[in-house]
Amino acid sequence: MLGDLRIVEIGEGMAVQFAGLMLSELGGDILKVERPGGDPARGTAPFANWNRGKRSLVLDLNTPAGLAALDERLAGADALLHQFTPGRAKSLGLDDASLAARHPHLVVCGITGSPYNHPDVERSDDDLLVAARLGVLYENDGHRAGPIVYRYRQGSWSAAHLAAAAILARVVMRLQSGRGGAAHTS
């Protein structure tokens, strides 16, 4: 279905990896960029599940050579899926304005813990920390005192689905306009 869609994925969080998996399962060609030494979760069941069908490339994005190699991949890609905060993306030259100038065709989807225009956008995107900030780790009367930590990663599951849908919607828009653009979610 999406056999011609090329996506570069950068991130070790569940939301980014699962969004990439959904697009891969639809036939997209996903290149997972990993840090030197590889993803720390490599060898675990979630890693194997969320990254099946993807190609992998190790790049050090803290070096000019690593960023140049990434830029070469982005020149031939349809979309970039990442989990950088806006500040971190800007420090790497992967912010919306920089990418639009170098790769106007590129659809960019950043998954963060808070929306891009929110004061907490630079804070952690860890599911439990976001849930705690939002106040959803409520006390369960009769169970025990204190917040209840749930194992279901509702935020990550939701963000993954929104990211995959946003990328596809933005690619459809690009068919009409010829330009990519941002399709961020949190």
Image: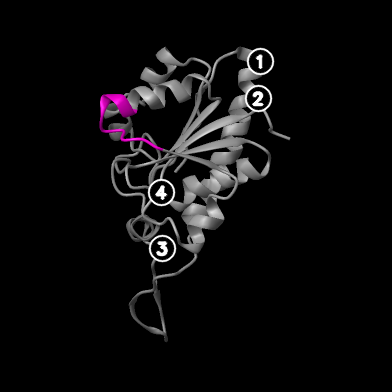
**Residue 96 in picture, x, y percent from top left:** 40, 23
Q: Distance between the residues labelled 4 and 3?
A: 24 Å
Position of 69 relative to 102 (above/below): below
Query: Which of the two labelled residues, at mark 1 and mark 4, occupies the earlier sequence position?
Result: 4
In front: label 4 or label 3: 4
**Residue 164 in picture, x, y percent from top left:** 58, 40
**Residue 147 in picture, x, y percent from top left:** 35, 72
- Residue located beneath label 2 in the image: 172
- Residue located beneath label 4 in the image: 12
Q: How far apart are marks 3 and 2 (CA)?
A: 35 Å
* Residue in the image at 41% along x and 14% along y: 102
In front: label 4 or label 2: 4
In magenta, the rendered stretch is 58-66
Whether tag 2 and tag 1 are in contact, CB under 8 A, the answer is yes
* Residue in the image at 30% along x and 44% along y: 120
- Residue located beneath label 3 in the image: 136
Query: Which of the two labelled residues, at mark 4 and mark 3, occupies the earlier sequence position?
Result: 4
**Mark 3 falls on what kind of element?**
loop
Query: Which of the two labelled residues, at mark 4 and mark 2, occupies the earlier sequence position?
Result: 4
Position of 69 relative to 47 (above/below): above
The amino acid at mark 2 is Val
Of all residues, the one furthest to the bottom in this rendering is: 142
* Residue in the image at 32% along x and 29% along y: 66
Quadrant position of the C terminus in the picture? top left
Whether tag 1 and tag 4 are in contact, CB under 8 A, the answer is no
**Residue 28 in picture, x, y percent from top left:** 63, 36
